[in-house]
Image (cartoon, rainbow, N blue to C red):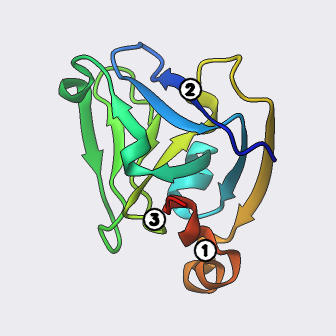
């Protein structure tokens, strides 16, 4: 995979929430089967939080949902309801970017890995997902 970091832009459906993220043009994305991700059909990749930036007045259009351990912060747009990014339980020091919320044209390759969110602890220990939010 290409490790060169580039700028990707994205956001929600109504475009009131906009952001930019620094990530390679080739990413590893996670398809999770936890109760929330499976209902939303979520596939995401994770970056260190310092590589993510909200743009403009996006923050005023966000609200947050938590459940279970309340570690994950599921942010979504108050207007259109789209979760374009969130703070995942697996990486509370990072940001999970919803793959389908990226503006087209900057990703050249996506490898999709499975995360068994229904058996969270064992999947967390086996997948190495925690390293996704670490800077090198």
Task: Single out the residue that lies furthest toward the left.
Answer: 60
| Residue closer to the observer: 89 or 91 | 91
Query: What residue would you read off at disc 1?
Result: 118
What residue do we see at 78% from left, 51% from top? Answer: 112
Q: Nearer the viewer, mark 3 or mark 1?
A: 3
Mark earlier in primary sequence (3, 1):
3
Q: Which mark is residue 91?
A: 3
Separation of residues labelled 2 and 3 (CA atoms): 20 Å
First-in-chain label (2 vs 1): 2
The answer to which quarter of the image holds residue 26 is top right
Q: Quadrant of the C terminus?
A: bottom right
10 Å neighbourhood of mark 2: few (<14), some, or many (≥20)? some
Determine contact: label 2, label 3, CB under 8 Å.
no
- Secondary structure of the residue carrying tag 1 is helix
For the residues labelled 2 and 1, the Cα–Cα distance comes to 30 Å
Q: Nearer the viewer, residue 78 or 128?
A: 128
Judged from the image, the secondary structure of the residue bearing numbered disc 3 is loop
Q: Position of residue 114 (x, y in %)?
A: 74, 63
Q: Is residue 92 above or below residue 111?
A: below
Residue 8, numbered label: 2
Asked which secondary structure carries label 2, the reply is strand
């Amino acid at each position: 995979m290409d490790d060169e970091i580039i700028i990707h832009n994205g956001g929600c459906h109504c475009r009131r929430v906009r952001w930019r993220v620094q990530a390679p043009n080739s990413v590893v994305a996670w398809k999770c089967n936890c109760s929330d991700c499976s209902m939303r059909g979520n596939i995401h990749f994770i970056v260190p939080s310092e590589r993510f930036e909200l743009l403009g007045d996006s923050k005023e259009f966000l609200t947050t949902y938590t459940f279970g351990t309340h570690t994950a912060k599921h942010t979504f747009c108050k207007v259109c309801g789209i979760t374009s990014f969130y703070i995942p339980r697996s990486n509370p020091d990072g940001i999970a970017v919803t793959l389908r919320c990226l503006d087209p044209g900057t990703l050249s390759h996506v490898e999709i890995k499975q995360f068994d969110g229904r058996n969270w602890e064992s999947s967390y220990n086996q997948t190495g997902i925690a390293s996704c939010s670490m800077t090198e």
